[in-house]
Image (cartoon, grey):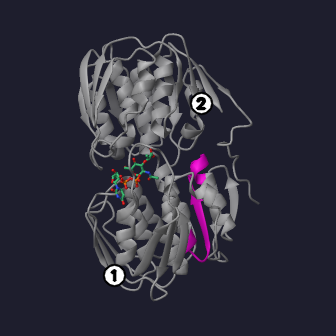
């Protein structure tokens, strides 16, 4: 399997440009299936999750062209309702968006249950509740999700989400834009990527209002036309570099960002004593002489994002005193703690609460990337540790960070990639004409 070899004692300095938002892109690409025309999408991050989804669309009959490495044109005019590569769907969480887009476009969908990072139970009951409310018959059997619009076309409905769910909010939005009549999603998630999806759909002729609030209204239209759209910058990629700068005691200017999307991350970093200065589309992060301990709880947006929790877990190993992290979204998102203990960290975990006895130097060790954000956190740990750290299973990291090693080495890190060409997890970029 592919590995990163990291020589520690790094201090990151310089400037890094943030790529397009992964969690927007992995919803917008499947949503392009709804459009009979050419969708030109800019600022697509070049990561394996977007590759996987583009490959699936091509198997459904879409034409995908790379204008450059971050701009593609997707034409789903001739897409057909047929089986798509199930082994690819099983690899990623975002394959669930194909339920909404295939139902919306074709009135029928067959997908696998989604894959993705494993940190506890991640059901899709709210997605299914939404599709059924829109008039689909949905069954899960043998690891597959079968969905059919009972009248051939979905119809609008009012749907109250029992749990604030990013995926269910976006999946129902995708399914509802071509439904007959009006849909209202109550208790909707409010993340920036939800607004980005709504803006993409509206630029293709949809009528979605209220995205970014907890009540989203969708007036169904008969057809979507082609158009152009540019994806917002990735708030979690930006937050990861902010924490890396703070943890290594460096000074990094992070560009191509929307500071408003980073408010929760900036606020908690300031609490640790880290210096943060915000500009129009950039943020400067300077490490503190001595990091202060803090308490942290992850919540739905605009609360502190769960996808930044592992990175802060590493940062707080450096802070003097005892910090407490409470994971408010998932049952088990502390698997990375075992890996940090191999590096000398003193951390106790009890269910959704993690207590970090900070102020100890970490020492390099062989560790695993347990999932996407845990993997990024282990890279930060390797950069601050004494000695050398070898991280296995780095394919997780490459699912969500574009040119991660290249960008970090340009800031002064010392990371070497050891590729294992026999790694079954490795899929090359989908090069289509
Ligand atoms: C999305 O996952 C993101 N993934 C996750 O990012 C992110 O952690 C999460 O939202 C929360 O922000 C993508 O967008 C591809 P949820 P999703 O539905 O949609 C429960 C990353 O690192 N739930 O908001 O799966 C669920 O178990 C990844 O980029 C139900 O109970 O998250 C969780 O406890 C990791 N039933 C909570 O709700 C459902 O039907 C929030 O999940 C759906 C979710």
Q: Does the numbered disc 1 mark a residue whose Cβ is under 8 Å from ligand 1?
A: no
- Residue 20: x, y in percent? 52, 48
In the image, is 25 to the left or to the right of 338?
right
Please say if 351 is above or below 302.
Answer: above
Residue labelled with disc 1: 182
Extreme residue toward the front, this view: 142
The quarter holding residue 159 reads bottom left
| C-alpha separation, residue under disc 1 versus residue under disc 2 | 46 Å
Q: Residue at x 70, y 46 (%)?
A: 428
> What is the crowding at mark 1: few (fewer than 14 residues within 10 Å), some, or many (at least 20)?
some
Residue 207: image location, x then y, percent: 40, 76
Q: In the rendered image, which quarter contains the C terminus?
A: bottom right
Task: Please tell me the numbered disc located at residue 405.
Answer: 2
SS at mark 1 in the image: strand
Residue at position x 35%, y 11% from top?
Answer: 360
Q: Is residue 165 left or right of residue 14?
A: left
In terms of secondary structure, where does tag 2 sit?
Answer: helix
Residue in front for this viewpoint, 371 or 66: 371
For the N terminus, the quadrant is top right
Q: Quadrant of residue 278?
A: top left
Residue range corresponding to the magenta coloring: 33-50
Q: Is residue 374 above or below residue 154?
A: above
Dot 2 alpha-carbon crowd within 10 angstroms: few under 14, some 14 to 19, many 20 or more: some
Q: Which mark is residue 393?
A: none
Q: Circles 1 and 2: CB distance less than 8 Å?
A: no
x and y, in percent, of residue 89 in the image: 58, 58
Q: Is mark 2 within 8 Å of ligand 1?
A: no
In which quarter of the view is residue 88 placed? Answer: bottom right
48 drawn magenta: yes
Which tag, 1 or 2, sits closer to the chain's start? 1
Say whether residue 291 is visible: no
Q: Residue at x 45, y 37 (%)?
A: 373
């Amino acid at each position: 399997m592919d590995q990163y070899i990291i020589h520690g004692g790094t201090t990151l300095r310089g400037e890094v440009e943030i790529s397009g938002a992964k969690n927007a892109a992995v919803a917008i690409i499947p949503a392009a299936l709804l459009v009979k025309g050419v969708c030109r999408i800019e600022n697509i991050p070049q990561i394996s999750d977007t590759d996987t989804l583009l490959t699936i669309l091509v198997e459904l009959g879409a034409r995908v062209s790379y204008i450059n490495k971050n701009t593609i044109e997707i034409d789903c005019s001739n897409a057909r309702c047929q089986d798509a590569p199930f082994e690819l769907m099983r690899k990623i969480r975002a394959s669930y968006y194909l339920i909404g887009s295939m139902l919306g476009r074709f009135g029928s969908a067959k997908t696998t249950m989604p894959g993705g990072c494993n940190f506890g139970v991640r059901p899709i009951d709210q997605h299914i509740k939404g599709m059924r409310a829109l008039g689909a018959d949905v069954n899960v059997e043998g690891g597959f999700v079968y969905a059919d619009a009972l009248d051939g076309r979905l119809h609008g409905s009012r749907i109250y989400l029992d749990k604030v769910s990013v995926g269910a909010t976006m999946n129902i939005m995708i399914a509802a834009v071509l439904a007959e009549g009006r849909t209202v999603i109550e208790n909707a998630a409010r993340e920036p990527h939800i607004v980005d999806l709504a803006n993409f759909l509206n630029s293709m002729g949809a009528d979605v209002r209220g995205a970014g609030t907890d009540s989203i209204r969708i007036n169904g239209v008969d057809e979507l036309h082609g158009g152009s759209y540019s994806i917002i910058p990735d708030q979690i990629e930006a937050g990861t570099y902010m924490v890396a700068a703070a943890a290594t005691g460096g000074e990094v200017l992070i560009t191509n960002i929307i500071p408003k999307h980073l408010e929760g991350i900036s606020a908690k970093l300031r609490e640790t004593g880290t210096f943060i200065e915000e500009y129009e589309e950039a943020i400067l992060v300077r490490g503190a002489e001595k990091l202060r301990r803090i308490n942290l709880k992850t919540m739905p947006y605009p609360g502190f994002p769960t996808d930044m929790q592992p990175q802060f877990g590493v940062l707080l190993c450096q802070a003097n005193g005892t910090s407490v992290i409470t994971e408010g979204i998932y049952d088990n998102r502390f698997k990375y703690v075992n890996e940090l203990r191999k590096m000398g960290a003193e951390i106790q975990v009890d269910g959704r609460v993690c207590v970090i006895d900070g102020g100890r130097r970490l020492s390099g060790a062989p560790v695993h990337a347990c999932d996407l954000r845990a993997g990024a956190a282990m890279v930060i740990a390797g950069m601050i540790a004494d000695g050398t750290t070898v991280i296995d299973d780095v394919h997780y990291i490459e699912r969500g960070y574009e040119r991660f090693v290249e960008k970090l080495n340009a800031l002064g890190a010392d990371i070497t990639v050891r590729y294992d060409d026999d790694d079954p997890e490795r899929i090359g970029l989908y090069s289509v004409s």
